[in-house]
Image (cartoon, rainbow, N blue to C red):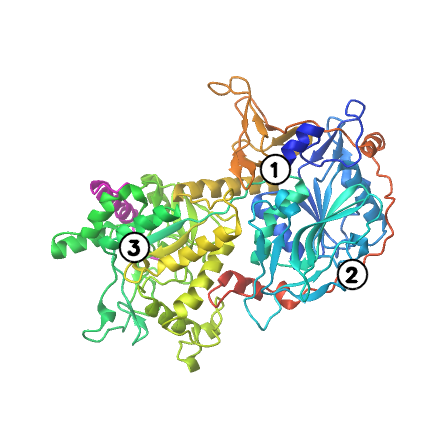
Amino acid sequence: MGFRNRWAAALTAAGLLALGVPTAMAHADTAAPFRTDLRVLVVDDGGPTVAAITAELIGEGIPYTTVLTSDPNRPVVNAAFLTGTAPDGTVEAKYQAVVLSSANALGTGSAETNALNSYEQSYGVRQVDANTYPQPAVGLNWPQNPGYLGQLDGMTGQVTAAGTAGAFGYLKGTVPFEDNNPNVIESYGFLSTPLATEATGASFTPLVTMTIPGTTAAGSLLGDYHHDGHDELVTTFAFNQYQQQWRLLARGVVDWMTQGVHLGYDRDYLSVHVDDTLLTDSRWSTTHKCTLGESGCTPDAGSPDGIPIRMTAADVDFAKQWEAANNLTLDLAVDGSGSDTVVNAVGTDPVEQEFAANASAFRWINGTYGRGFLGCVQNVTVVPWVCSTDATGATQWTSQATVTAAAQTNLTWAQGKGIPVDPGTLVTNQSSGLAISPQQTQDNPNLAPALTALGITSLASNGSAESAARQVGSALTVPRHQIDVYYNAATAAEEADEYNWLYTATAQGGSGICSSSAGSTCLAAPLDETTGYQNAIVPTEAKIAMQRVLGNDPTPEVLHQSNFAEDRIAYPVLNQILAGYQGLLNADAPLVNLSMKDIATQLQNQAAWNAAVAAGTVTAYQVGSTVTVSAPSGVQVPVTAPNGTVQVHQAGATTPAPASTPVGSAYAGELSGWLAPDAGQTAVTVQTLAAPAQPALARGLARSHAAAPATAGGVTVAARPLEPAGIATPVPYGPDDSTRLAAARR
């Protein structure tokens, strides 16, 4: 039985609360009511493990409060900090879950630790120990006889039956730990077994384990330590927010700590944009190490370097078959000028005809006819180019009429060919029109009014230059991520050769750019041009894309039409992403394949919600079985809850008017969605399956508003060792892993 299904059964059978289930119960008819705010308390030591958990809270949209232990002016964690009185006089439990850097983060037996323990006991609040050394004080044996202390690189964790039945049920079972560099310790942890005899009333349930080297025993990596009336998730390995093992576990850790009900919305996304559709792309010269059309790049007479790359009708059919086999639709950014060029030369274009005949198999994004640059007027007489200026020194810009004509001409062309381009979308050549560093430091001022006049609602942008969406006229930018499979390569050998040129030192035959670039590092040695693409580039690019897939990031990956021609080198990367994902996650957590328009909507929802949370204009709490969320007008509210949870509607607000509807849609064994109040409602109201009984200690707190000291304090907890540098500083997957390279340089 899955985690959320177990919730439903437990709530139905025992009348427990889906959020913050107390461990010491009293009769509901005699207990004073209290409310639990939907907010997480994070006690932060500044280390990478807490940073990873915080990043997950931010990514999902979960409100949190940070207490930095090194800050001399931080608030004291006591009853007044943890509880209060709501405006209606109800006792307020201010946090639904607690994250500590380790089990002793506030000091063993300290007043703060005792206050926190009492709070968790009183309100059934769970605690995550982000990285703790295994020991009897947390329900585990010391990591010896059997046990292990050390590097976990390349090893594999295993979700236990309890983990599968609980918060980690979306995983198929294995949790591989990365090993990107054999010379760097990237993962470090401690493996030990639960105590044979726990203290009275205590238990330790491993949720994710790893075989202890040299034995057949399973050592705990993540385990639920129930003791003294509350639960801790004891984590005995270090991690950072970029590592795949954490990304796989993050959703489950959040669900465990919040017990299945929280604000926020989480999906695993994969959308693939194919640029230059119907155009031809120039080819990389493996001899001259340049691309035809670049300054000074002239291929030898008769050389295949001079043959441009373009898909064939057979490539179109293959793409359609691949989509059907993999349940993933490609988004094609089309430029009709490429087809017209072919027609003018030979009279017909079989590729356009095949696309038109199979148009419904794809999604279509509008491009700009003619591949023009829509920013400043370029002066290409110098390298690199600069923006042209007039006699006064003012920048010369492409006119609004030219921008409008490029998009409208292409849309009209596509409609005339029966290609159903979405008129609200636009991809410009090289993201031109938007600022391009360093030559063009601002958007073309004529771009925004052109977009508004055209009714464009989503505009492609370069994700490596600007990672956040922003409004430009009527359009929201959609940051896109170029997979490092180059537009000028159609064969594996061409791709490997160009990769070597970019990512090897001059002494190894490369350009040497890698040694001076802030966005890359050099390969240790050049790739074999026969096997290097499949053996090195494909797995690297798949891992980089997977990091975004598992990061609740809806923004798309980008390839080019050239990559779907000749050797069809796009497919090995896409196949590896899909196979890797399907090998790790269950079918109830499928990849979500959004259109560009829907990506923009998701980004808008995320941005509006995050802004409201940051501004403190969101109020969310649970009393009994009812969750109430207030947010500014027009802001969609993200809610995640167990199956069976419903949104309560205003009578007469819909036609017909249901009393309630499910909270969003099913994903990863639970429900989640973006909700809005009905007309006449001032808040979103969500109903869980049953009302809770209240813990006896909570009734006392309701009277006194003060926590009783914990009775189980004073047990010494040994400090954990410091994390190795490879955890604090993420180790890149490869030389083009710009995200981790940037993190490593911070």
In the rendered structure, the answer to whether residue 415 lies left or right of residue 591 reads left
Look at discs 3 and 1 and give the one toward the viewer: 1
Q: Quadrant of residue 379?
A: bottom left
Badge 3 is on which residue? Answer: 276
Q: How many numbered circles does the render carry?
A: 3
First along the sequence among labels 3 and 1: 1
For the residue labelled by badge 3, is the local secondary structure a helix, a strand or a loop? Answer: strand
Q: Nearer the viewer, residue 251 or 409?
A: 251
First along the sequence among labels 2 and 1: 1
The reply to whether callout 3 and callout 2 are in contact (CB within 8 Å) is: no
Residue 4 marker: 1
Q: Residue at x 30, y 76 (%)?
A: 288
Gap between marks 3 and 1 measured at Cα:
45 Å
Expressed as whole percent of the image width and height from the top left, the position of residue 315 reads 27, 55
Residue 427 seen: no
Q: Amino acid at mark 2?
A: Trp
Q: Residues within 10 Å of mark 3 (few under 14, many from 20)?
A: many
Q: Residue at x 18, y 55 (%)?
A: 341
Look at discs 3 and 2 and give the one toward the viewer: 2
First along the sequence among labels 3 and 2: 2
Q: Residues within 10 Å of mark 2 (few under 14, many from 20)?
A: many
Gap between marks 3 and 2 measured at Cα:
59 Å
Q: Amino acid at mark 3?
A: Asp
Residue 176 seen: yes
Gap between marks 2 and 1 measured at Cα:
33 Å
Q: Tell me where the magenta segment starts and ends, as one range.
A: 394-420
Expressed as whole percent of the image width and height from the top left, the position of residue 338 reads 22, 54
Quadrant of the image containing the N terminus: top right
For the residue labelled by badge 2, is the local secondary structure a helix, a strand or a loop? Answer: loop
In the rendered structure, the answer to whether residue 587 lies left or right of residue 296 reads right
Q: Amino acid at mark 1?
A: Arg
Badge 2 is on which residue? Answer: 142
